[in-house]
Image: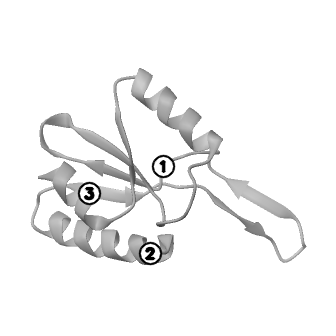
C-alpha cells in the first residue's frame, strides 16, 4: 500500500473517531517544495511524525505512516528516539488495523 492511500484510510478513520468525541488529531508532518521563484522551502523538522493524536486521560500518540515498502529514514528514527526519551508514544504504522489496535 502506498503511504498516500494509507493516509486517506487513517484520516477517514480518525475523523470518524473525532466526530464521536473519542480523540482529537491533526496532521503534523513537515512540508517541502518549490516556490514560484524556484527557491526550495522546507517547513517543519526532519523526521517529524505525520499525525498527532490526543486521547483521553492525557495520552498522546505520535504516528508516522509508512507505505508497505517505504523504508524508515534515519532522521525519523532519531526523532522517535527523542520523543520516547521524553516519555511519549511514537509508532510507525503500515496499515490501519495497527492503529485501530493501539487506539482501542
Q: Earlier in the sequence, mark 1 or mark 2?
A: 2
Q: Between residue 90 and residue 57, name the one nearer to us.
A: 90
Q: Between residue 95 and residue 27, name the one nearer to us.
A: 95
Q: At 48% from the left edge and 60% from the top edge, which residue is drawn?
A: 66
For disc 1, the marked residue is 49
Q: At 62% from the left edge and 49% from the top edge, which residue is drawn?
A: 44
Q: Is residue 7 left or right of residue 54?
A: right
For disc 2, the marked residue is 1
Tag 2 and tag 3, C-beta contact below 8 Å = no
Q: Quadrant of residue 18?
A: bottom left
Secondary structure found at label 2:
loop
Q: Residues within 10 Å of mark 1 (few under 14, many from 20)?
A: many
Tag 1 and tag 3, C-beta contact below 8 Å = no
Secondary structure found at label 3:
helix
Q: Position of residue 67 (x, y in %)?
A: 48, 66
Residue 99: mark: 3
Amino acid at each position: 500500500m502506498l503511504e498516500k492511500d494509507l493516509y486517506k484510510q487513517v484520516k477517514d478513520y480518525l475523523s470518524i473517531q473525532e466526530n464521536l468525541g473519542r480523540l482529537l488529531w491533526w496532521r503534523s508532518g513537515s512540508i517541502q517544495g518549490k516556490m514560484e521563484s524556484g527557491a526550495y522551502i522546507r517547513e517543519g523538522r526532519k523526521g517529524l511524525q505525520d499525525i498527532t493524536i490526543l486521547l483521553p486521560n492525557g495520552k498522546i500518540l505520535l504516528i508516522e505512516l509508512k507505505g508497505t515498502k517505504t523504508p524508515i529514514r534515519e532522521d525519523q528514527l532519531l526523532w522517535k528516539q527523542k520523543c520516547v526519551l521524553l516519555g511519549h508514544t511514537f509508532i510507525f504504522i503500515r496499515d490501519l488495523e495497527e492503529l485501530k489496535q493501539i487506539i482501542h
